[in-house]
Structure formats: structure tokens, C-alpha cells
Amino acid sequence: MVCDMCYTHVAVAVSIVHDLPPEELRFHWKSGRLCLDFVATVGERWRRSFERLLAPDDLARWLLETGMLEVPPKVSGRQLAAARTLRESINRLARPGIKPEPGDRDQLNRWATRPTLAPQLRSDGGLGWAAERPVEAMLGTIARDAIDLLTGPLAGRIRECGASDCALLFVDTSRPGRRRWCSTEACGNRARTKAYRERRKQPA
Ligand SMILES: [Zn+2]
């Protein structure tokens, strides 16, 4: 149960930063949940909070990279705007310490009522997915995933990466529930070497 006193921050507004190097625009798939990977389409939420879905084609690419669609869907500017709005609602509802805005829950609930992807039998006998309106179906799927996460047993296990220069959200599924970093190889090692350097700097 979240009380008003638990909120320590208001979410930073997303900004458009021009001429970002391609590696900054890469998508991240480390959270363990579709809805939180979607939240990670904004970079550096701890500092610049920059948009990675700059154009409709970026959203099409993200949707394809989820592996749930076989061809990139056609995305309109209106659909991109709707996707960003849903994403920011999920960010505020899921991120520990952030106060949601009044319409966030409605936004999420509205998308969750949309038809989602339907299972399909592919010619090779495998499982595929299809929808008449794939963009809306994917946003509906993301919204349902967020509701499932926020109301399920892992709701209290949503963490923000502990590295000072990372703000990715992830679900801590470790048994003791003490995972601190989105990825041990990247952020965990960086945090440890930084702590080591700081210890060395202190006079003995
Ligand atoms: Zn991290």
C-alpha cells in the first residue's frame, strides 16, 4: 500500500535531445517485463530524460524488437503520441518514490480494455501473433502487463537500478530480493569499481 508520504520525487519531463549518438538510442531489454522495457525507451531518466522514440518508425522498430510482431507495423504520429502518454503513465505508476498524476490510472485502464494480440498457427507449426490493429493491440498488451505486474506478487519487487548514472527499472526475481542493479555486468561492475576508486582516494 502506497501512502502519500512515500513519494519523494515528481517524474522528470521527457525532452527531445538532438544528435544523440546511435548507442544512446539503442533499446534496452533488461527489466524482465515488457511494460518496464517500454518505460526504458526514455534514456537517462536520472538526468537528461531523453526520448528514444523520436519518430513513428522508432516505435515500429521497438514493437518489432519485442519479438511479438513479425513485420514492423505502420505507426502514425497520433499513435506515437498515444504510446508516449501511456509509457509515462506506466513510469509514474511503477517507479518507486514517484507520484502518479491524476489521469495515469485511467490511461492505463483504458488501454487494458483494448483487444490484444491473438495467437496464430504459423505454416511451420509454430506460434505467431496477429491483430487487425497491431499498434493498439501492442499498447493494450503493454498496459495489461503493467496491471499484472502492479497488482501481482512482484509489485513490491520493482526496483530502480542502484547505479548513480542509470535509472532503469527492473523486477527483482532473486530469492532474497536484494538485487540492486539492472545488470551486474554493466551497472554492478561500474558501481563496484567506482566505490573501489573512492576508497583508494581516502587517506589511510
Ligand atoms: Zn543500471
Image (cartoon, rainbow, N blue to C red):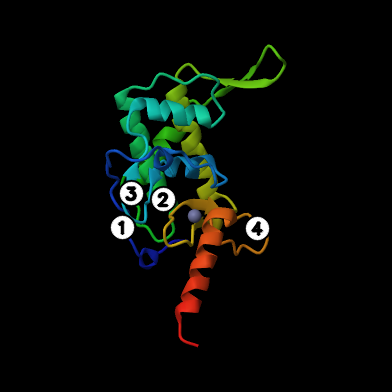
Give the CA distance from mark 4 to mark 3: 28 Å
Q: Name the residue under label 1.
A: 10
Residue at the image point whose x is 44% and y is 59% from the top: 96
Q: How crowded is mark 4: few (under 14 residues within 10 Å), some or many (20 or more)?
A: few
Looking at the image, do the residues carrying marks 4 and 3 touch, with CB atoms under 8 Å apart? Answer: no
Q: Earlier in the sequence, mark 3 or mark 2?
A: 3
Residue ID for mark 2: 93
Q: Nearer the viewer, mark 1 or mark 3?
A: 3
Q: Earlier in the sequence, mark 1 or mark 2?
A: 1
Mark nearer the viewer, 3 or 2: 3
Q: What element carries label 1?
A: loop
- Residue 120 picture quarter: top right
Q: Nearer the viewer, mark 4 or mark 2?
A: 4
Q: Position of residue 197 (x, y in %)?
A: 49, 72
Judge whether residue 113 can be spotted in this image. no
Residue 194 falls left or right of residue 86: right
Residue on which the image places disc 3 = 49
Separation (CA) of disc 1 from disc 2: 11 Å
Q: Which mark is residue 174?
A: 4
Element assignment for label 3: loop
